[in-house]
Image (spheres, grey):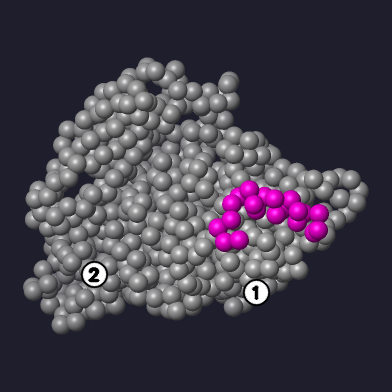
Amino acid sequence: MRKTVQDTKLTEDCTKETIQAFVEELLPQLSLEEKIGIMSGQVTEKKLLDDLFVIEHYNVKPYPTMEVERLGVPNIRFVDGPRGVVSGSSTCFPVSMARGATFDRELEEQIGRVIGAEVRAQDGNYYGGVCINLPRNPRWGRAQECYGEDQYLLGEMGAALTRGVQSQNVMACVKHFAMNSIENARFKADVHTAKRTLHEVYLPHFKRCIEEGAASVMGAYNKVYGEQASESKYLLKDILRDQWNFEGFTLSDFLWAVKDAVKAVKSGMDVEMPCFCHYKDELPQAVADGKIDMQSIDESVGYILRTVLFFETRKDPQEYSDRIVACPEHIAVAKKAAEESMVLLKNENSVLPFDKEKTEKILVLGVLGNTENIGDHGSSKVHPYYTVTPLRGLMKKMPAAQVLYDDGSDLNKARNLAEDADAVVIVAGYIHSDEGEFLADRSDIADMGGDRASMRLHQRDIDLIKGLKGVNRNTVVSLVGSSAILIDEWVDDVPAIIFSFYSGMEGGNVLADILFGDVCPSGKLPYTVALSEDSYPAFDPDCTYVEYEYYHGYCKMEKENLPVLYPFGFGLSYTDFLIGKPEVQVFDGIAKVKVLVKNTGSVKGAEVVQLYIGCENSAVDRPIKILKDFARVDLKPGEEKDVYLSVSQKDMAYFNEEKDAFEQEDIPYIAYVGNCSAGSKLQSVNFKF
């Protein structure tokens, strides 16, 4: 057990009932000041802003709540994420959107175990990095922190990260609850939607993580139905507590999410973080004036203490010293995540992989070709002790080759260099100033992220790519960014395209491994790449009021018959796969789908088999089909495996607004199985539950 609980009567791995009894005895012994301290972050606002803007290392050490040592009461010690532990110099993974492209639950759980261990090694016990907001439009600045446009994928990957983190006795925080997907306007946007849309589109992934046992839920800055999300009784009590039976504690988004302490506590907001602010300033007098009773305070303190004490009294699976932070074993996991995430979008005439024996001169072009570019510089910024750029990765991969670099600003020079090279790698895309967390109080800072101004590349990148058209047949564009980038104006000008995302500390090495065939690309797009911004929901980064519609992403584009360049779930490989005809068997309201997958190519690779479900004769308007399961399968050349997927009748229920509940339907369903959401790539079979 950890230090503060050693002198209590709690034992290792004690039951929830024992902890409940202990907390009931404890509450009367706590002073009001101590209770409010337990409910409040202990960082000063000056310290927080200094971390952000002076030392430029937010959350350099865990941000704590009050510890009541005299009674053996441990505190919350918050560490942010989600691309790794932001404290210290920790392992930097690819951003969550990249990891969504892996469609690999097992790997994401392994990443969670690494992150949880590094949190513990730096004296944290709480991880604020399970970010599962739904990016309805790719321009959202923090899309990189989430796993994709589909709510099922968000839920499954968020649940996997939660499992991994909490296996190390670290409390996982799921955020931001709810409907937070506009960055610049996050402090003022009032988000509205139909109740059916809320429950079917914007909440299922949160519910999935709660079912997985997530210890905590963070509120959002935005308003929902006219109320601050972090003060919304409808979200925090009616849904989270009463409908989902959530037993953990809630925590506010930082500093500006709570406006009214009394309303927040009464509505179910347990912890105000990271600074002692409204709770400390307002609650003592509110109790004295009878505006809030001690029962409401004790309710919040009870949720906090029961959760913290449960995790603090679990037996640890390993020891946690600073030696494990960014150790070789952890970096290997980050590298594997980068390997599985990069998406091969185009490979005309099998340009890739490059031939190691015949490639003697490599040219890297573009401003980002030798830039350490791991993503946003806001609260998710990790500080690894090294980052491999594309140029450095290629130099390491091909030590005997001549590897040249040019930023591409002089097109004539770039063309001349490209003509003389055996392979050309153009690195194009974004950095933290193009998309990332928006810090409203520092508008004087130039490179401050926020929502994207456009879904297309910078003109410098477009000019470079188009200017190199036809110059060298061995040309590949590596796209760096968080979510969909529209590329239709130049897609025909290059033979090969890889979406490499913000790929973490090992990204440059992995890109080189894929370009030269030591790694077979296997990532699948966790979003849809359309031909026009108009294909996505309307996006106003300066809105004060917004309505979220039911349809977005591939569901919207299929419903409206909109053409797309690359469908959700799409990704090429260096090998070929055959996916057989699906078979369905139904038992007790669960449809089990079996499909044979075979590697018919010449190299080892991985395929992601995806199950989409459509329905007929529904009482309500439904998507043509929607993702309900997926499985990643690794196969050697000639190898075949049966893959099993499933969906339950409960999974296909719709939210009946009149009954304020989900309703199952006894109607025909269609199972679509394939390797992306495009209808031409899917095989279907009809069934009934």
Residue at image mark 1 = 50
At which x and y percent is residue 535? 39, 39
Mark 1 to mark 2 CA distance (whole Å): 38 Å
Would residue 114 be counted in the magenta stretch? no
Q: Is residue 309 left or right of residue 362?
A: right
292 is higher (above) or lower (below) than 384: above
The residue under label 2 is which amino acid type?
Answer: Ala
Name the N-terminal-most of marks 1 and 2: 1
Circle 2 Cα neighbour tier, 10 Å, few/some/many (<14 / 14–19 / ≥20): many
Q: Is residue 310 visible?
A: yes
Q: Quadrant of residue 404?
A: bottom left
The residue under label 1 is which amino acid type?
Answer: Asp
Residue toward you, 437 or 103: 103
415 is higher (above) or lower (below) than 623: below
Q: Is residue 376 visible?
A: no
Q: Residue at x 58, y 25 (%)?
A: 660
Q: Main secondary structure of the magenta part?
A: helix
Q: Quadrant of residue 235?
A: top right
Q: Is residue 675 left or right of residue 206?
A: left
Residue toward you, 11 or 456: 11
Circle 1 Cα neighbour tier, 10 Å, few/some/many (<14 / 14–19 / ≥20): some
Quadrant of the image for the C terminus? Answer: top left
The magenta segment is: 11-30
- Label 2: which secondary element: helix
Residue farthest to the right, as pictured: 289
Residue at image mark 2 = 512
At which x and y percent is residue 364? 25, 72
- Label 1: which secondary element: helix
